[in-house]
Image (cartoon, helix red, strand yellow):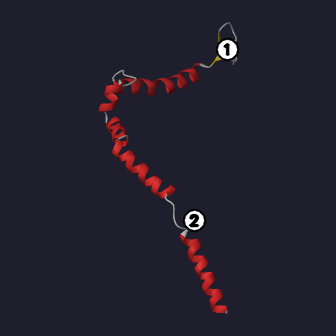
Amino acid sequence: MPEPTPRTIFGGRVVINSKLVLYYGLMAAIPVACALIYSGGKTSLSPEELMQSETGKRAARARDETLEAERKAQMNKVLFENRASMQTDWAIKKEQERAERRAARQ
């Protein structure tokens, strides 16, 4: 039985196997075609359509100035509010326990 001759394109520089080309071509083309059919051929939204969508509304709420000001105030309170002591609560408690042990020894 004779060996099948490979198919070449571009003047014999590229060898193709028609089954693999068909398989991978369809594997790449079918999802794209389905997405275009689902979207009605649209590949992007205009800014007005985007702001009317649920995602745009959610983003607009997140940018609300009053909420942003409240978040900044909370972060400033947590990060930059000056305590009387720079020690954390657990360090203060540990220091008190050490002082109690020293007092108990004496």
Q: Which amino acid is tagged 2?
A: Met
Residue most extreme to the top: 11
Q: Earlier in the sequence, mark 1 or mark 2?
A: 1
Q: Position of residue 3 (x, y in %)?
A: 70, 18
Q: Can you say whether 58 is above or below 40 in the image?
A: below
Q: Position of residue 38 (x, y in %)?
A: 35, 27
Q: Is residue 24 left or right of residue 7?
A: left
Quadrant containing the N terminus is: top right
Which residue is denoted by mark 1 in the rendering?
Answer: 14
The image's mark for residue 106 is none
Count of labels in the image = 2
* Residue 49 shows in this picture: yes
Residue drawn at x 58%, y 19% is 18
Quadrant containing the C terminus is: bottom right
**Viewer-nearest of discs 1 and 2:** 2
Residue 46 vs residue 84, the one in the foreground: 84
Q: Can you say whether 14 is above or below 32 in the image?
A: above
Instruction: Specify the quadrant of the image occupied by residue 47.
Output: top left
Q: Secondary structure at mark 1?
A: strand
Q: Position of residue 82 (x, y in %)?
A: 51, 60
* Residue 5 shows in this picture: no
Residue 2 vs residue 83, the one in the foreground: 83
Q: Is residue 37 left or right of residue 100?
A: left
Which residue is denoted by mark 2 in the rendering?
Answer: 86
Q: Which amino acid is tagged 1?
A: Val
Residue most extreme to the left: 52
Residue drawn at x 35%, y 37% is 55
Q: Can you say whether 40 is above or below 14 in the image?
A: below
The Cα–Cα distance between marks 1 and 2, rounded to whole angstroms, is 71 Å
Q: Is residue 35 left or right of residue 89?
A: left
